[in-house]
Image (tube, helix red, strand yellow):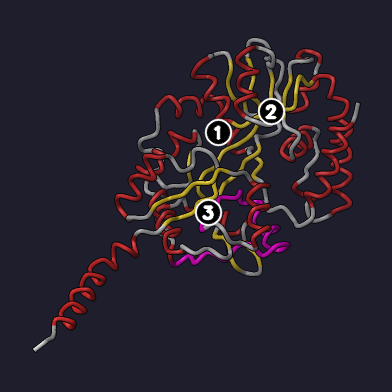
Amino acid sequence: MKTIKQLATGVLAATFAMAAPQMASAETLRLLTWGGYAPEDVISKFKAETGIDVEVTKSNNEDMISKLRATGGSGFDLAQPSQDRISGAQAEFDIYKAIDMSKIDSNLFIGSMLDATKSTTMYDGKSYGVPHIWGTSGLVLDTTKAASVKNYTDLCSADVAGKVSYRLKRPTLIGFAFSMGLDPFAAYDDTTKYQAIIDQVTAKLIDCKANVKTYWSGGDALMNLLRSGEVTAAMAWDTGGWKLNKELSNITFVAPKSGALGWIDTFALPRKTKAEGAAYKWINFVMQPKIASMVTNAAGNFTAAKGGDVDVDPELQKRFKASFSQADIDNIKWYPAVPAGLEVLEGKALDKINAAK
């Protein structure tokens, strides 16, 4: 016969056993990502299905690298750097861990994008990223006042003097290089050639300073400048142009003649992730077509999910088609992996442009 103490012990054990699954599921996925990539309605659906909370920290490429470098790859369970910013950072700082492709439902992805991202994020024979959201940067124009702007270097023309804005960031260097008939990506593995290209672009951007109303750093500030008419021609992301087009039909995104710059933001595992299982669950969850459509409607960019446009806003699809002909899509310049140390050269060039009178 069991004693009261034994019975009590048994009841407690049973209680803990019953609570164990609930306790185990009450985990948190710490997500380091871009604005709009983890909408609240998607997070709610994910929690309802898995019991996992999602804690979102909004960031950008430079900040992600900085945060993970400072902690040796800890503090977050899943990050979303662009595909060209992974292998170089991994080589320099060892902040990520390789993706276990057996835990990824590859049938959810557009095959060509999955293959390309696995290749681009390769380091030491292992892939460190899978694709999530893609988009481009190019020109956002008031087509009634800046119709002559067809390429990045046209931002330096007299037609738009004092009405121009772009960021002092590496995409501006890259975009102007292509517009000048140069190929910076082909020079990535030759520092001397790349420096020569950057020097030419630096000189061009210094000459162009008189045309610039302001260098923008935040998308909201740029959109307000375009709304007010203070800026009529800018270098910016496609989503910004499409959002403004909803309000003002004369403003939209235009693919530059030399090619829009294409990026793919990925899923990557920080080296010291504490919720790896939750990270893989999130990846496979958000790549489902209907969930992917919810993300696109929130972020404004399309995903690498197969059939991921099933429930996308028809107006957004219409704006995309108006900005991109098939030739424009074929002419997108996709960012390759950035070799370690290359951004140091670019940083010096950007500082020189900023300091120039």
Identity of the residue drawn at 26% across and 66% down: 19
Real-space CA distance between mark 2 and mark 3, rounded to the nearest whole angstrom: 26 Å
Q: Which residue is mark 3?
A: 267
Out of 268 and 48, give the one closest to the viewer: 48
Circle on res. 205? none
Circle on res. 235? 2
Q: On screen, 7 above or below 21?
A: below
| Three-letter code for the amino acid on which mark 1 is drawn | Gln
Out of 269 and 82, give the one closest to the viewer: 269
Real-space CA distance between mark 1 and mark 3, rounded to the nearest whole angstrom: 28 Å
- Which residue occupies the extreme right position in the image? 357
Of circles 2 and 3, the one toward us is 3
Out of 58 and 124, give the one closest to the viewer: 58
Residue 116 part of the magenta-drawn span? no
- Where is residue 172? Give x, y as percent: 74, 35
Q: Which residue is mark 1?
A: 326
Mark sitting earlier along the chain (2/3):
2
Q: Are marks 2 and 1 in contact (CB under 8 Å)?
A: no
Magenta region, residue range: 77-102
Label 2 secondary element: strand
